[in-house]
Image (tube, grey):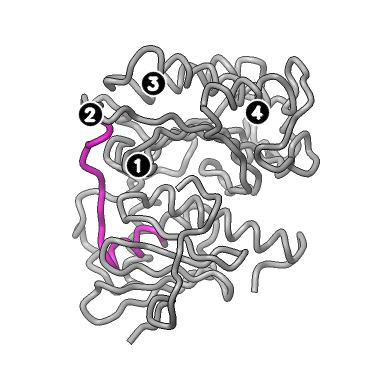
Amino acid sequence: MLLTPADRGPGMQPAMGRPALADAWLAAPVSELSAPISHHRATTLAYAGALARGPFGGGAIDMGLAEASVRGGGCFVRPLPLDNTCASAARRFFREALAGSDLSGDLIHDGVTMASELAANTMNAHGNIEFGGQGRPVSGMPEIWVYIRVFGSGRELVCKIFDSEPGWDAGEPLPVGASVPAGPDSIRGRGLQMVAGLSAGRWGHHLSRGRLGAWKVQGKAVWFALRIPPGSELATSQRLAPRGSRAIAELAAALADRGLGAGLVPVTEAGGDLAVVSVSRRLTVWCRGEIVWWQEPEGGYDRLPVTDLVEAAERIVCAHEELIATRGADQGPD
């Protein structure tokens, strides 16, 4: 039997402070700069599935998390340019992500405005970008991510801007909600005040890793979220919902795609409804049926439904990076 926190004792609670259509809608979830899905993703998923002893080889699944549209539970990803067109590119990509949706024009306008503000700040975060032939970036480039996650009894649209600088202005990040001095274009300026207002306080930042490029570079994601109106089709769309060993295999593949594959050890209980993946000695993820959960670095437990695997993977990556940060830049988590 695989022991879980729920088996060991009481009090498995979500971590505090975590913000718990047409076919054209996000038809191409991954940028051309990422590794080819047809080979790389299939190999990664088959490897993770084999470790989890789940039914993942030989074309046993029709679609995985990486191939899913945002409407179906996946994540829209695009690289942002390294020049002053990054803000306009973010506006264009945000609209592309919502093409065919039934969200109101006002809601889309607010999202476009916030995505533009956050993307403009990546101009100050080019220190960890690696360039290849002809000066093209091959890793560490800024990225925009768009996906849907559960929020309360409904859903919210999440937009994150990733860059390879772990701190704000290459320094230490300010606490979420802290007052920020105003400047016209600064990461600590009026842009974030606008984001805080338009998102009704649903914004923040956290440590993360890139999704694109040859190497999944460490850095930060700055995000905002917009509540999806209950009457919208996006509030009720069917989403990918793998259970047990299949969910763990999907998570393992997603984490491997983010550069955490070296230490992944999935294990499945007979029957496959309870499965576990060890990310490191201090970070273990469980899935029983339709719920996935793990222990946060501060000690509490965070849990999500399997329909929120993109959000789960992002939080697990963040927990992994926080563990590394507490041990120093030269050591991994225990």
Give the residue drawn at x 55%, y 32%.
201
Is there any visible trace of residue 139 in the rendered image?
A: no
User: Which residues fall within the magenta stretch?
Assistant: 234-251
As drawn, the label of residue 96 is 3
Three-letter residue code for mark 1: Gly
Judging from the image, what secondary structure is the residue with disc 3 in?
Answer: helix
* Image coordinates for residue 283, horizontal then vertical, percent: 54, 69
When asked about the image quadrant of residue 23, the answer is top left
Q: CA distance from mark 4 to mark 3?
A: 28 Å
Residue under label 1, please give it: 74
Pointers 4 and 3 in contact (C-beta within 8 Å): no
Residue type, label 3: Glu
Earlier in the chain: of badge 1 and badge 2, it is 1
Which residue lies under the disc numbered 4? 134
Q: Is residue 263 left or right of residue 303?
A: right
Name the disc covering residue 233, or none.
Answer: 2
